[in-house]
Amino acid sequence: MVDYDLLVPYGWTEAVASEYLPLLGDLTPARIVRMDRSECDVVTPSGPARASCPRDITGLCTGDWVGLDAEHTVRQLLPRRSAIMRSSVSGRSVAQVLAANVDTVLICTAADGDVDLGRIERMLALAWESNAQPVVVLTKADAAVDIPLDEVRAVAPGATVLAVSASADVGLDVLTASLTGTVALIGPSGAGKSTLANALLGAQVFATNAVRAVDGKGRHTTVHRELRPLPGGGTLIDTPGLRGIGLYDAAEGIGKTFSDIESLAAECRFADCAHQTEPGCAVLAALADGTLPERRLTSYRKLAKENEWMAARTDKRLAAERAQAWRTIAKQQRRRYRERGHR
Ligand SMILES: Nc1nc2c(ncn2[C@@H]2O[C@H](COP(=O)(O)OP(=O)(O)OP(=O)(O)O)[C@@H](O)[C@H]2O)c(=O)[nH]1
Ligand SMILES: [Mg+2]
Ligand SMILES: [Zn+2]
């Protein structure tokens, strides 16, 4: 009988066990705590280990549950209950998984800098789409003169918005109380994610950028996505700062982020209202009476358009791949046919 006790601090529960054990056969369950190119750090029922990742299992990510063989090779990626995905940096229509099996996404923005509402909306769309619950965290509250809590709350319907200071221990108990399961920190470089992670972990686990970057652009201090158990239960994933956050197939996430606009749109006279010039448009009416800021509508349109563009490219690429596969098959068939004819 295998003892799974050592996996419990890493998110192994009765529910996880009953879902995964029947799928694993002879393989051992393990959770990826850090990915490298072709190897990863995992935690197994016998403790931490290093595992190799063969090329045929692609897209593995920190937070994934996998099946290992006796040689500590990853043989199986177990079904994800959630995944934070963005379109890959190269701009190709390929998704990059930032973290897997996440329950709570902490969207971090420094309160002492320029609080970019559009970027928060973009990260919210990513978070809602992932199937995890977003919490918007305004960090470095101790250094901020004036924290735009109301403005941020207005762009984050359905999400908790909190101001915290990791260095002055402000708001950390309220934040801790709103965390469940696996928690992932996302946000731009320098937002204070690793500092907050260390505060939540109660130890200096992750390196932080103690010296202010001189080039003004900020240096990426964290380079790996790494998972650690939280002292009060649950796990935490620290991630490197996000430079660009391209949306990948996030129609539902955009809908949830802009649920205020979507419910206004449901009141428009015409079901296919484009909210441009149509009579009886509830969106334009809200714009006119000031209840819907123009910035928010513009942001919604921008993200929706970007998402449609990406979705169209993805479909085109899939179609091209299928066509290519079909050409290969057709070529093989012709060759076989010719070979038979010559015999
Ligand atoms: N005043 C103040 N400074 C903070 C706080 N949290 C973080 N900082 C500072 O902000 C800088 C960046 O912090 P990090 O935690 O390294 O930021 P990060 O988001 O992990 O950055 P990357 O790893 O590059 O993505 C450091 O100089 C921290 O000391 C805070 O609560 N208050
Ligand atoms: Mg960091
Ligand atoms: Zn309308």
Image: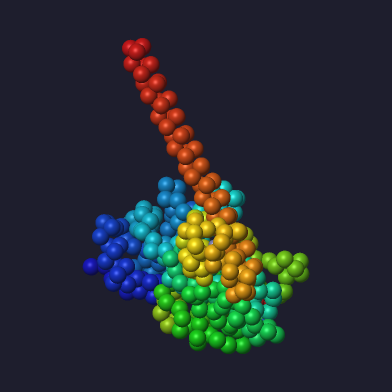
Residue 290 shown left or right of residue 46 in the figure: right
Residue displayed at 56% across by 78% down:
153
Residue 144 shown left or right of residue 81 in the figure: right
Number of numbered discs visible in the structure rendering: 0
Q: Position of residue 6 (x, y in %)?
A: 35, 73
Q: Work out whether 116 lies above or below 337.
A: below
Residue furthest toward the front?
279
Q: Ligand 3 is in which quadrant of the figure? A: bottom right
Examine the image and state in which quarter residue 244 appears. bottom right
Residue displayed at 56% across by 66% down:
283
Camera-side residue of 320 and 221: 320
Camera-side residue of 33 and 282: 282
Q: Position of residue 243 (x, y in %)?
A: 63, 62
Quarter the N terminus occupies: bottom left
Q: Position of residue 235 (x, y in %)?
A: 44, 74
Observer able to see residue 179: yes
Residue displayed at 49% across by 62% down:
269
Residue 222 shown left or right of residue 97 in the figure: right
Residue displayed at 51% across by 42% down:
316
